[in-house]
Amino acid sequence: MQSTSAKIPDSLDRIVKRLQRLSDPKQRYEQLILYGQKLPNFPDSGKVPENKVQGCVSQVYVTVSLDDRAKVQFSGDSDALISKGFLGLLIAGMNGMTLEEVQAISPDFITETGLTVSLTPSRANGFYNVFRTMKEKVASL
């Protein structure tokens, strides 16, 4: 199944397709939670106001840096399983991209995952806010 949005990077496209193959919303949630569980430990020193995602009910923190090849490297954490899953999914899909590749991503892929169908409006908005914050952080590099 080809993604319908503007071209998204292969790493995100693979994640979208994996989630699309899961017809049961519960399975999608389980997959989302797995992405969050795969995140490495995030230091408490990173849990500062400038790293906090605004517009999320839960506490979500994200940082970005460039590696020695000028590729984006995100890290982060959340105190909520679903929000941590959003973060883990986005980090898995966006780490290793160039600044330009990250900036070119449209949020359309979020809907294509099929996750937003069964999310509350505040959680769906939280997913978008995490993505938006990640793009803003990249723009500030």
Image: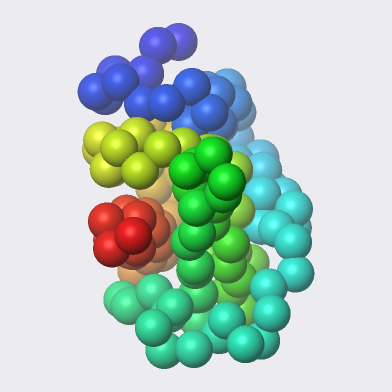
Question: In terms of depth relative to the viewer, which is nearer, 77 or 74?
Answer: 74
102 lies above or below 59: above
- Residue at 39% x, 83% y is 50
Q: Quadrant of the C terminus?
A: bottom left
Q: Residue 93 vs residue 131: left or right?
A: right
User: Quick check: can you spot residue 63?
Assistant: yes
- Residue at 60% x, 53% y is 88
> Residue 79's x, y, as percent?
61, 79
According to the image, what is the colour scheme of the structure?
A: rainbow
Q: Quadrant of residue 44?
A: bottom right
Question: In terms of depth relative to the viewer, which is nearer, 97 or 77?
Answer: 97
Q: Residue 103 vs residue 87: left or right?
A: left
Q: Residue 32 vs residue 53: left or right?
A: right
105 lies above or below 80: above
- Residue at 70% x, 58% y is 39
In the image as oriented, which residue stretches furthest toward the front?
A: 68
> Residue 49's x, y, as percent?
41, 89
- Residue at 41% x, 38% y is 98
Q: Quadrant of the N terminus?
A: top left
> Residue 110's x, y, as percent?
37, 41
43 lies above or below 70: below
In the image as oriented, which residue stretches furthest toward the top?
A: 1
User: Quick check: can you spot residue 120?
Assistant: no
> Residue 108's x, y, as percent?
27, 36
Question: In terms of depth relative to the viewer, which is nearer, 78 or 138?
Answer: 138
28 lies above or below 76: above
For the image, the number of numbered tags is 0
